[in-house]
Image (spheres, rainbow, N blue to C red):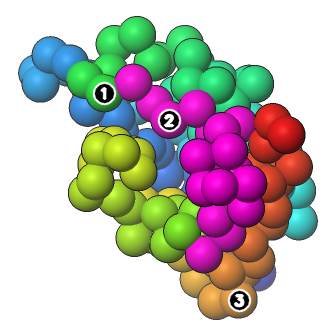
Amino acid sequence: MIRSLLATATIGILAVTVTLADQSKKVVIPASPTSANNGQQMYTSYCAPCHGTDGKGRGPVAPAMKTQPTDLTQLMRNNHGKYPDTHVVAVLEFGSELSAHGSPNMPVWERIFGNMNRTHLQEKQLRISNLAHYLESIQER
């Protein structure tokens, strides 16, 4: 019971910080609880503010960012017609320092997802996997 309350409290205070073009301003996007089994729900809550609901990189926060968010619908097209699942998982887990592969300002979701449920460590990987699968489903073919 206490662990459940602590986990809920931790989720309630988690937030994602995005550095904007003006280094003195930061946008805090709350990381509200979502189902680990629902990649679309996670995308809508965590990714859409920057990448847009359609994944094209035109979310409401995008105009204020230093680097335009990646058009996530073009990952397969930009990888010779093959969805780069290993790369997507790596970016979600470790972030990216290469501007062509995502802004270094993008949150490293592995840390955030890992803090959402510290009692079930497998949940972090389930979240990353389901989010990556959802991104595969929005690819333009």
Label 2 element class:
loop
- Which of pointers 3 and 1 indicates the residue nearer the eye? 1
Residue 104, position as x, y percentages in the image: 28, 48
Camera-nearest residue between 80 and 62: 80
Mark 2 belongs to which amino acid?
Answer: Thr
Provide the secondary structure element on which disc 3 rests: helix
Magenta segment: 68-86
Q: Earlier in the sequence, mark 3 or mark 2?
A: 2
Circle 3/circle 2 CB separation < 8 Å: no
Q: Are marks 1 and 2 in contact (CB under 8 Å)?
A: no
Graded by Cα atoms within 10 Å as few (under 14), some (14 to 19) or many (20 or more), the crowding at tag 3 reads few
Q: Amino acid at mark 3?
A: Gln
Is 139 on the left-hand or right-hand side of 96?
A: right
Q: Nearer the viewer, residue 51 or 138?
A: 138
The answer for how far apart the CA atoms under marks 3 and 2 are is: 28 Å
**Circle 3 sits on which residue?**
122
Q: Where is residue 46, by image quadrant?
A: top right
Residue with the most extreme front position: 80
Q: Residue 100, image x and y in percent?
A: 36, 45
Q: Identify the residue position indicated by label 1 in the image.
A: 67
| Label placed on residue 88 | none
Q: Which residue is mark 2?
A: 70
Q: Is residue 102 above or below residue 119?
A: above
Residue drawn at 34 percent across, 34 percent down: 18
Quarter occupied by residue 16: top left
Query: Who comes first in sequence, dot 3 or dot 1?
Result: 1
